[in-house]
Image (tube, rainbow, N blue to C red):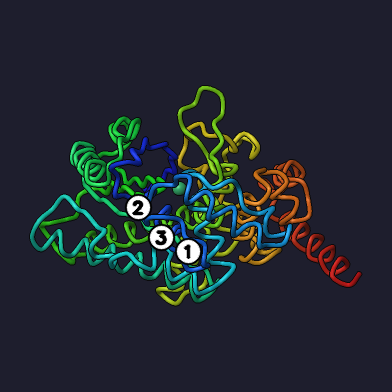
Amino acid sequence: MRPAAALTFIFLSFCAATASGSPRENAVCVQNQLAALGHAPGPIDGIIGPQSFAAASNWLNTQDQSVRATFPKLSHQSAFRWCRQLGALQPGLATLWPSAVTQSWGDRLYVDEAGVQGTIKKLMMVSALTQAEEYFRESHQIELAATFDVLGAENASDLNRLIREWGARRNFRSTGLPQIADDRCGDDFSLGIAMRYLIALCWHPYDTEHPLGWSWWEQHLESFKLIAHEFVHMVQYDLSADYPLRRIGNDRQRVIGPKWMTEGTAEYFAQVIEADRVDEDLPGMFWLYLSAYGFDDPLRDLSDTRPWPNEAHYDVGHFAVRILADIYGPEPLLEYWINVGKTQSWDQAFRDTFGMDRADFETDFEAMRKDIGKVLIYKRQRAELLEIKAGQ
Ligand SMILES: [Zn+2]
């Protein structure tokens, strides 16, 4: 079975007073940055109190309206946005980002196995995370400001145990996640869950009879791609600077953008990172077309948080995103999330990024998904339109 990578956003309750986890690191980041800007926030304690708030207001008052408009009221919820934006505004302040002051990857990985197997898996995880990190740094000049931990296990009960231990260590209480692990984490299923401060991976058991044998390597590559995919979700969180996740209906899951875009973009970049690593070209558009063929759910129905009934929907999202990437290049796929953070609107962000309505693209896609010829015509038409616009 091919790997399924699910993106689940689960709110973690956070106890500010006692925590030493990442939300506190975000507040510490802002406090240090304000101090560096000469606006003393009181003790650097990771708690946004009246003194931090006053320091933030004082600094804001020294800024132009255009800058002021991009900073929300300082709170624990908005601390990450402040921390990231101040670092982007003054590169020196990026040295105070949680990612810049945190330990190495090796200290943030937790697997359920001891001995050689555990060590090999950790090495694999470090290699995948490092490659993804380098890809975004070198190809797109993107550094993550936030940090996160990565857990990996072979079955739901081990994964749940690791998550509980992680929650206790980081002072989080997580709800919802164990059920997801129970439902989907099994012998023949690889699963990735990206939350704000955590990537949790369920991979099927490695072939321990034949370490380094073929199936072992196959598993290894699958896990590599799964980690790269989840890393892209971390990039989405970071670029949108903790956009307040949308909750749809009574669904407990929340999303950061239209699901076909979040997942399609993650699949697209995971593929790019993988191709980079083995020095190969991306698979042709035709293969994506074939993978998506035969699934009829309209793209617009693949936007909200409902779990997808079929893994092939990842291919549908990937196909749609690949069309955008072929026309506009990969950069706008990342700009989109910056715009989601700026506009707080999926649709406005789409318009600002691609110069068309999301609904129109979703309609256009329906015509293309059953006729590869239409994809080529569409790409040419949009490219011509872009040239005309550029010439104006
Ligand atoms: Zn995903």
Q: Which residue is mark 1?
A: 33
Q: Amino acid at mark 1?
A: Gln
In the current view of this chain or complex, which residue is farthest to the left?
A: 115
Q: In the image, which disc is placed on residue 228?
A: 3
The residues bearing labels 1 and 3 have C-alpha atoms spaced at a distance of 31 Å
Kindly identify the residue that appears in the image at 35 percent across and 50 percent down. Answer: 199
In the current view of this chain or complex, which residue is farthest to the top?
A: 250
244 relative to 97 in the view: left or right: right
What is the quadrant of the C terminus in the image? bottom right
Q: Which residue is mark 2?
A: 45
Q: Amino acid at mark 2?
A: Asp
- The mark that comes first in sequence, 2 or 3, is 2
Kindly identify the residue that appears in the image at 47 percent across and 52 percent down. Answer: 233
- The mark that comes first in sequence, 2 or 1, is 1
Q: Amino acid at mark 3?
A: Ala
Dot 3 lies on which element?
A: helix
The reply to whether the residue tagged 2 has its Cβ within 8 angstroms of ligand 1 is no
Question: Where is residue 10, by image quadrant?
Answer: top left
User: In the rendered image of this protein, does residue 1 appear above or below residue 273?
Assistant: above
